[in-house]
Amino acid sequence: MINVVIFGPPGAGKGTQSDKLIQKYGFVHISTGDLFRWHTKNETALGKRVKEIMNSGALVPDEITIAMLKEELDKNPKAAGFLFDGFPRTVPQAEALDKFMKENGSAIHHVIALDVTEEEVRSRIAKRRTIENRADDEDEKLNKRIMEYFGKTIHVLPYYEKQNRLKTINGIGSVEKISGEIAQALDAK
Ligand code: AMP
């Protein structure tokens, strides 16, 4: 079984494509964003530490994020394959993930990057905003998240590219077309 990272900016369609991949391949889905939201909602000690950071749209420090991810991996020792969504977002996170997978005699086999430009993301969000009439603080947070992606997270891609593990897929198009291309990349020998 394979382990996959799905990568892309906010609004790229990672959530939609993750659902399709889970259905098709039966991955154990690890979304660090979902895990952090669970912790803040349930007011755990970790949740209290990260609440303000998340509310601002900034990245949670690596040390906290990596420890949470490791705990999640340890909870699933028998997983046939993982789909990582929203992790890694920095090079130290990518290195930690490789180390953990290696310790389990496994590896990250594919990194699927949904390619959507900053301009397209902003235009999608602007459209959504006119429909949903979102609050200003939400706008600010989203803006910060987009800046975090294009300022920091995108620098993880060369890490995987150098090791020939990166497959970039055009994130603009129908859900079916994109999921078909992802499946092709994953099934390729
Ligand atoms: P997401 O739903 O993946 O966009 O994540 C929501 C928020 O959780 C982000 O804006 C960050 O504050 C935090 N977060 C999620 N994953 C990570 C990560 N890998 N590294 C740092 N912060 C993260």
Image (cartoon, rainbow, N blue to C red):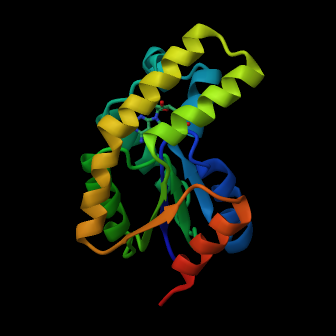
- For the point 59% across and 19% down, the residue is 43
Query: Residue 85: where, in percent of width, then height?
Result: 52, 51
- In this picture, residue 95 sits left or right of residue 25: left
User: Residue 45, percent across and down?
Assistant: 49, 21
**Image coords of residue 64 (percent x, y):** 36, 33
Q: Nearer the viewer, residue 174 or 187?
A: 174
Q: Quadrant of the N terminus?
A: bottom right
In this view, the residue farthest toward the top is: 136
Image coords of residue 113 (percent x, y): 46, 59
Give the tally of numbered discs: 0
Eyeballing the image, is 121 above or below 3? above
Q: Quadrant of residue 96?
A: bottom left
Q: Residue at left 45%, top 29%?
A: 145
Task: Using residue 66 as the reference point, say whether residue 179 is left or right of it.
Answer: right
Instruction: Please state if 21 lies on the left or on the right of 139 as rendered.
Output: right
Which one is in front, 141 or 128? 128
* In the image, residue 179 above or below residue 96: below
Q: Residue at x 37, y 44 (%)?
A: 89
Horizontal side of 108 relative to 185 (left or right) equals left
Can residue 1 be seen by looking at this rendering?
no
Residue 114 makes an appearance in the image: yes
Residue that protrudes farthest toward the bottom in the picture: 189
Please tell me whether residue 67 is drawn above or below residue 46 in the rendered image.
below
Q: Nearer the viewer, residue 22 or 36?
A: 22
